[in-house]
Amino acid sequence: MRCVALVATAAALSAPNIRVAEVPKLADRIDVTTTPSPIGHTEAIHFVPSGDIFVDDDALIASQVTATRSRMISEDATFFHRAGPRREVVFEQNEAKACIVTCGGVCPGLNTVVRELYLCLAKQYGVNTVYGVQNGYSGFKNWQRDAVKMDSKFVYEIQRKGGTVLRSSRGGHDTSKICDALEAHEVNMLFVIGGDGTMKGACKIDAEMQKRGKKCVVCCVPKTIDNDVPLIDNSFGFTSAVEAAIPMIEAANTEAEACPNGIGIVKLMGRHSGFIALHATLASGDVDLCLVPESSFEIEEIMNHLEAKLRENNHALVVVAEGAGQAQMGASVKFDASGNALNEDVGLWLKSVITQHFAADRYDTDPDFAGKKAKCFLVDPTYAIRAVPANAYDQVYCSSLAHAAVHGAMAGYTRFLVGNINTRLAMLPLDLVVNRRNIVAIRDRMWTRLLFSTGQPPFDAVVTSDDECDAEGLYRSETATGGCTVSFGDEY
Ligand SMILES: Nc1ncnc2c1ncn2[C@@H]1O[C@H](COP(=O)(O)OP(=O)(O)OP(=O)(O)O)[C@@H](O)[C@H]1O
Ligand SMILES: O=P(O)(O)OC[C@H]1O[C@](O)(CO)[C@@H](O)[C@@H]1O
Ligand SMILES: [Mg+2]
């Protein structure tokens, strides 16, 4: 199994049973010489650290932090490389040439990551050449037009803006052309900021640069408001998107409250995973029904629940993730330029079935409904929740992620992504994450709290934590959710 091949038993380490998710290093592929890190030693460096800020190569973070007296952490855990500056780096100051690209849909914090990558490269390591390639992977096809040499002015105050100053795109990945451009401009550090598709593309670039025998590292800062990147605590932009969803929920609730038997419906992004809907529902506390792609549901049960809420409160509030209800709608599968499945509009569909249901004759004679027809108010903010600037939490997280990526790149790590594992910054092998997706666990304690909050019936899970589990006990194998593997995080 893929996971087993990647997670080497660390025989060289003193504890015989620990599994380390090894991140490849350039030194494993080609001859590289190391040099002391310039941090704290170079005139170009503004920052002079006090004490030892360096992290040893054998510093690890455990995937598990819970244990019992009879079963200790190392028996269940996979260990990840701890991110941070290394004492030795593999790029001389004048040799290093970096390139940054943003791909896929936008996400709060993209500009912060771009800015912090630049600042760490230029100010901490004295890297003089940092290119920004505009328009996603497609930009590599037209370097003269799309590549910009970044400087302090370019990144000035960009963290305050939503979107990406480098612009982004879907589709258009051509590994060979991208590598030709990197080679032609002597780029030896590529930083890609993007989601699952972007990371698959990054793996191909890394493989091609290795095949060409090039000294080039490929590092990813994973991006998605959907929070479906497996293993890491959360992806940047997620909490900002949840926060932006709250006023939308309040608006729908206000409309619903202001008329007899009003039903507010809020459709939130979440192509395959319902984390935004789940967290926004819990954060709001006003929601009566939350539907996510991971949960099945029966229309009849939904209507019974909404009817009870209307009788009780005169209004009801629904939050639905865009990927929910696709099976019930009989949606046909279409794809975008990057091969992502496009969802049918579950918001419009729900509005129509709920309106139809409460238009039935029997409600005309019902004392709770007579003369007070139910009315639906659909709020579909679409891009409004992801086009916002990063919130305070994401600003800080983005900064940490960007610096972790640069430190790893300077030390010669490649084919990796950065993320928090149990609140500590880690480097993870890309191969452990691509083709996997994190999903909402419908039977965990968090979902249980949602059930108490909304009072909705406990529908079955589409994919459950009892489904196939691989030898590591950590990941699920192929599922019906778009051919991707899913992983269930620790309950919290
Ligand atoms: N299997 C793949 N191999 C190589 N490149 C890919 C692959 N899948 C997607 N890409 C490329 O990655 C880029 C981004 O992909 P995509 O549009 O799916 O966004 P993403 O990174 O998955 O983010 P989002 O979460 O917004 O979907 C596109 O340029 C696309 O061509
Ligand atoms: O309209 P676009 O740009 O394809 O993006 C839509 C998708 O982006 C996502 O937020 C993922 O980033 C999905 O939830 C959503 O389906
Ligand atoms: Mg994608």
Image: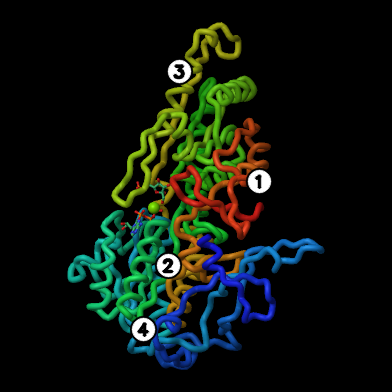
At x 56%, y 44%, the residue is 278
As measured in the structure, the alpha-carbon distance from the residue carrying label 2 to the one carrying label 1 is 30 Å
- Disc sitting over residue 127 in the figure: 4
As measured in the structure, the alpha-carbon distance from the residue carrying label 4 to the one carrying label 2 is 19 Å
Residue placed under numbered mark 3 in the picture: 356
- The residue positioned farthest toward the right in the image shown: 69
Local SS, label 3: helix
Local SS, label 2: strand
- Disc sitting over residue 444 in the figure: 1
- Lower sequence index among marks 4 and 2: 4
**Position above or below: 264 against 55:** above
Q: Nearer the viewer, residue 78 or 346?
A: 78
- Disc sitting over residue 220 in the figure: 2
Local SS, label 1: loop
Amino acid identity at mark 2: Cys
Whether disc 2's CB lies below 8 Å from ligand 1 is answered: no
Whether disc 3's CB lies below 8 Å from ligand 2 is answered: no
**Position above or below: 283 against 263:** below
Amino acid identity at mark 4: Val
At x 68%, y 75%, the residue is 16
As measured in the structure, the alpha-carbon distance from the residue carrying label 3 to the one carrying label 1 is 34 Å
Q: Are marks 3 and 4 in contact (CB under 8 Å)?
A: no
How many residues crowd mark 2 within 10 Å: few (<14), some (14–19), many (20+)? many
Whether disc 4's CB lies below 8 Å from ligand 1 is answered: no
How many residues crowd mark 3 within 10 Å: few (<14), some (14–19), many (20+)? few
Amino acid identity at mark 3: Gln
Q: Position of residue 488 (x, y in %)?
A: 59, 52
